[in-house]
Image (cartoon, rainbow, N blue to C red):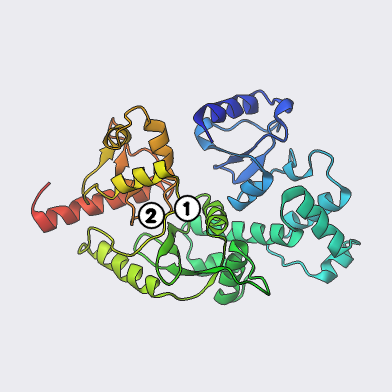
Amino acid sequence: MEDHQTEEYYAALVRRDATYEGRFFVGVKTTGIFCRPSCPARKPKRENCEFYGTAKEALLASYRPCLRCKPLSYPGASDVITRLVAAVEATPEKRFKEADFRELGLDASTARRQFKKRFGMTFVEYARSRRMGLAMKEIRTGKPVIEAQLASGYESSSGFRDAFAKIMGETPKRWDGTYLQAKWLDTPLGPMLAIADDTALHLLEFVDRRGLEREIERLRLAARAVIVPGESIIFEQIKQELADYFDGTLNKFATPRKLYGTPFQRLVWAELERIPSGETISYQELAIRIGNPLAVRAVARANGANQLALVIPCHRVIRTNGDLGGYAGGLARKATLLETERRKDWMLHGTH
């Protein structure tokens, strides 16, 4: 989303402009909820807002619907949708079955059809997304994966990861397209999610990254693939390289990777890989290095669109004044990565 559009949407949010209904939804980082433009609640600070074109995008980013403005019930939502959303929010960890629809006096096929028509997802997909949203919220607070798993209603790790895989793409009964494998990797800075095929790494992100679900959705569409838990020789390579990186014996990753960005994004990412470990550059300098000094904001957006954390070192870009700037994995983690790399550089080369 362009910066000018973001500012326009925030201004509309502040004045509770009902003419923007249906054009955007706002996710509030501090509360974990998403709202309509005219929500009567107290307005958040600009830096705590994320804007989405659809309710589905907000849900996939782990936000829950606001209880005051009811973004999933506006405008003209049917009684079926209103009741089902209320049922999920009452017990979001619950896994709904046919009997639960009957208990609510609703026909399951009608519910699925109406949800699909309105939100681009079935009710079951919505409920599953909310459960995983709970899990991601638990993980973001620093709790172990096992606690997140239990908090989201799963008794087994396989069930939890299978559910996560279903969000990434249900395997069709007859599918002759591309399969991508997903695996969780532990690191000193928290668990990461890796997605790969047998030849390349497609995604590597910290699991507490805000908007991870949207990244996965974009990857799934770009690759025209389904994503399931599994193993790949690529996981063994990236796992070893991550261990070497955090041990201080690896400065550049060699794992083959698959990139899905635009030509401009790929140009930025290629330049990122030229930044030596232990060093940083500014967004302005990055724009200059790719031959487009006026494209600072576009460079920043391309930096944020990187789906291969650490492998493509977007954390090495900071603001001109020395501030860290943004990082989807969290500023504390960015600071730790930079300090760790500087310390490694000093140990390996005796430089400051």
- Using the image, determine if residue 271 lies above or below residue 309: above
- Using the image, determine if residue 189 lies above or below residue 155: above
In terms of image quadrants, where is residue 284?
top left
Question: Residue at image x 57%, y 56%?
Answer: 221
- Using the image, determine if residue 317 lies above or below residue 101: above
Whether the residues at callouts 2 and 1 have beta carbons within 8 Å, the answer is yes
- Split into 4 quadrants, where in the image is the N terminus? top right
Left or right of 179: which side holds 294? Answer: left
**Can you identify the residue that label 2 sits on?**
309
Q: Nearer the viewer, mark 2 or mark 1?
A: 2
In terms of image quadrants, where is residue 84?
bottom right
Left or right of 267: which side holds 31? Answer: right
Task: Name the residue furthest left.
Answer: 350
Q: Secondary structure at mark 1?
A: loop
Q: Earlier in the sequence, mark 2 or mark 1?
A: 1
Q: Please name whichever residue, 258 or 183, is drawn nearer the observer in this view of the structure.
A: 258
Q: Evaluate whether residue 297 shows in this view.
A: yes
Q: Secondary structure at mark 2?
A: loop
Question: Residue at image x 41%, y 44%?
Answer: 263
Label placed on residue 116: none
Left or right of 155: which side holds 332? Answer: left
**Can you identify the residue that label 1 sits on?**
209
Q: What's the CA distance linking mark 2 and mark 1?
A: 10 Å
Q: Mark 1 belongs to which amino acid?
A: Arg
Q: Position of residue 111 (x, y in %)?
A: 83, 58
Q: Evaluate whether residue 85 shows in this view.
A: no
Q: Please name whichever residue, 151 or 119, is drawn nearer the observer in this view of the structure.
A: 119
Q: Mark 2 belongs to which amino acid?
A: Ala
Specify few, some or many for label 1: CA neighbours under 10 Å numbering under 14, 14-19, or 20 or more: some
